[in-house]
Image (cartoon, coloured by chain):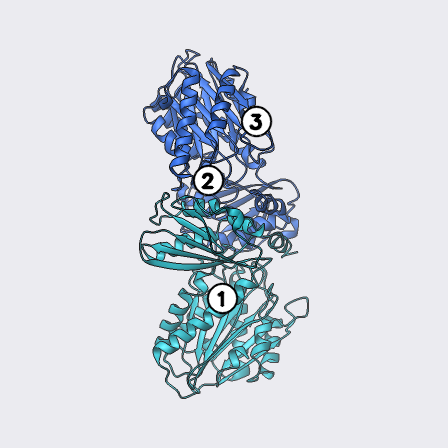
Chain colours: A cyan, B blue
Amino acid sequence: MSVTAPLGFEAAGVAAGIKKSGARDLALVVNRGPSRAAAAVFTSNRAQANPILWSKQVIADGEVDAVVLNSGGANCFTGQQGFQVTHRTAEAVAAALGISAGDVLVCSTGLIGDQLDGVVLEAGVALAARELSDQGGTDAARAIMTTDTVEKTAIFRGDGWAIGGMAKGAGMLAPGLATMLVVLTTDAVLGSGQLDVALREATRVSFDRLDSDGCMSTNDQVSLLSSGASGVVPDPEAFRLALVEVCTSLALQLQTDAEGSSHDISIEVLGAVTEDDAVEVGRAVARSNLFKAAVFGNDPNWGRVLAAIGTTKAPFDPYDVDVSMNGIRVCSQGQPDQPRELVDLTPRAVSVVVDLKQGGASATILTNDLTHDYVHENSAYAS
Amino acid sequence: MSVTAPLGFEAAGVAAGIKKSGARDLALVVNRGPSRAAAAVFTSNRAQANPILWSKQVIADGEVDAVVLNSGGANCFTGQQGFQVTHRTAEAVAAALGISAGDVLVCSTGLIGDQLDGVVLEAGVALAARELSDQGGTDAARAIMTTDTVEKTAIFRGDGWAIGGMAKGAGMLAPGLATMLVVLTTDAVLGSGQLDVALREATRVSFDRLDSDGCMSTNDQVSLLSSGASGVVPDPEAFRLALVEVCTSLALQLQTDAEGSSHDISIEVLGAVTEDDAVEVGRAVARSNLFKAAVFGNDPNWGRVLAAIGTTKAPFDPYDVDVSMNGIRVCSQGQPDQPRELVDLTPRAVSVVVDLKQGGASATILTNDLTHDYVHENSAYAS
């Protein structure tokens, strides 16, 4: 169901012919109202794809009628011609639905630096518009997959209202202010300002804490659309928590399907002075290729964790820091503690806990190991 | 010859029994004078190994009599016990040579978080002291190897003076202010202040431009010792250039022997506003796992170059940036230019040229590709 779980939404996912494989590659999500309130966050990469440039204009007034998403091409570094294809795609959606192109968010994902074919996209939009259905959420989630092996969806049912969501993302997975392609829908009655606050808070503690391969995308976009069709004004705190839950569920699904990964690694940083420090430390560990390769080999090489921490600006004392891996404290006060042989890293889930002992702030960063399959998949992607 | 090429130096490399394999694992370099002037630079990683803490004290007065180096253990995150082993090693050198422990630099490399055996080190120092020779440079260079497959040495012969050097380093190879273990020697007559200026300038444009795997070491140390035994005061500019040449030679040897690598990648950034901007951009590209995996697969995926540039703070216009790979301009003004199929990435040497078109500054960063062998070597290291 994903994005069509809440009332007031229709979706479709079709094979438009963008992908040579013939797989579904174009999704359309439509908000039938009565509300059209929306919010969106975008990649902080300064190299931004054409659909990002377009969608930033669309979201400015806080109203969105539809989101069109394609896989099979990122439409990034494709110049003016690429921007015109994005514009043309939005116009095709507008024509098919009788709405304004200025209320259509556009998302693209795939190879950077290849032009998309506007004619193919227009035909795909027309097809998707004909197949729109309040049961179309799963098809839409499938149509945005690239190297993803499964569709990612999440649903939260509140007191008379619901949130639905879909996501794609398996590589170039280190979101900054947003992540990959995510569409969230709700039938709760909320204004665009409320949606914006809730979305930024939820992405900050979910997608922004995921750093699978250290590579920030040019196309990350997360949007949240409200139809208001339930007629229910939710308790703000309940809605906030529900949105965090949906986003966290999607982030965990992204992590566990990350390209070539064999471990899901959670790096919990405790005792930081500030939350920003905790995030910086966790992210530094998550970006250590040496640490990630060691986890792939089921090797609890905690020295590589500490070497990564030393590259940050976060306050810590190398002579008073603790590290545990899967429950075994291998480093205490900056020295060897329990034998590393006691750590069992064969399960897919790996927990690393770093205690900086400097303050009361904490954060958890999610990442993956560095595997032969990651190298293989990303050395053969474009060919 | 390496460090024993200049007059006034003796060296040895022996098997002390630190490595289980029985390979050489302890090197000693001794300056017989008449000068004892020296300079050194160290890792900027805030997690610093015990030999770094020790050597920073030693170099403070600008005088050094000897450098002792061991492979087989980094002596990092080993606490007070580890520091005592470093101290004990320096004392052993002092006793064997009749000098002060406070004039002995100590360098260690190997696994982080394991204690070294002080008794084994003491015996190794005694053995090395007996084998000191003005022909011992090559043995010393071999004794500091870890995952290196060949020893790295360089010699420059000036007008009546010489510079010699040795280096080790194959992984955790992203120096910050220094790199790995390097000992440089000269018989030119220079004071410690002059040596310090020349060393910082040379490392800034050589080792500091090497970023093989993005992981900064806890043990990086580069020292430069002058015996003054030639009696020749060199032309300062000639000495500066010679030192840059020796350091660059060693940096290139480190690059081409980097763990598991199949390509040596040079990322030349042109048209930057400042040299710092150029370095930041080159380093961002050098740290993109996606780009590095693509090069491994001989795939000229220039979109991943631009996606990495977008994560930096350097001024650039995504719509006016050029990228060439091995002489083929694949991206012009932020759009596809020559077909990527024209780029031949099968040679080991790969040249990436990025023109930011914003100013007159430039820099070249050296890196390697991300390969199956890198993952294999670093997943099996500790086991």
Q: Which numbered dot is residue A226?
A: none
Dot 2 falls on a residue whose secondary structure is loop
Q: Subunit of mark 3? A: B
Dot 3 falls on a residue whose secondary structure is loop
The C terminus of chain A appears in which quarter of the rendering?
bottom right
Residue at the spot of label 2: B217
Q: Nearer the viewer, mark 3 or mark 1?
A: 3
The crowd level at tag 1 (other Cα within 10 Å; few <14, some 14-19, many 20+) is: many
Q: Which numbered dot is residue A251?
A: 1
Q: Is residue B218 left or right of residue B170?
A: left
* Amino acid tagged 2: Ser
* Amino acid tagged 3: Arg
Toward the viewer: A68 or A207? A207
Dot 1 falls on a residue whose secondary structure is helix
Toward the viewer: B257 or A9? B257
Does the CB distance between marks 3 and 1 fall below 8 Å? no
Q: Residue at x 41, y 28 (%)?
A: B199
Confirm whether residue A75 shows in the render. Answer: no
Q: Position of residue A307 (x, y in %)?
A: 44, 44
* Amino acid tagged 1: Ala
Whether B122 is drawn above or below A63: the answer is above
The crowd level at tag 2 (other Cα within 10 Å; few <14, some 14-19, many 20+) is: many
Q: CA distance from mark 3 to mark 1?
A: 49 Å
Q: CA distance from mark 3 to mark 2?
A: 22 Å
Whether A105 is drawn above or below B101: the answer is below
Q: Position of residue A16 (x, y in %)?
A: 63, 73
Q: CA distance from mark 1 to mark 2?
A: 31 Å
Residue at the spot of label 3: B24
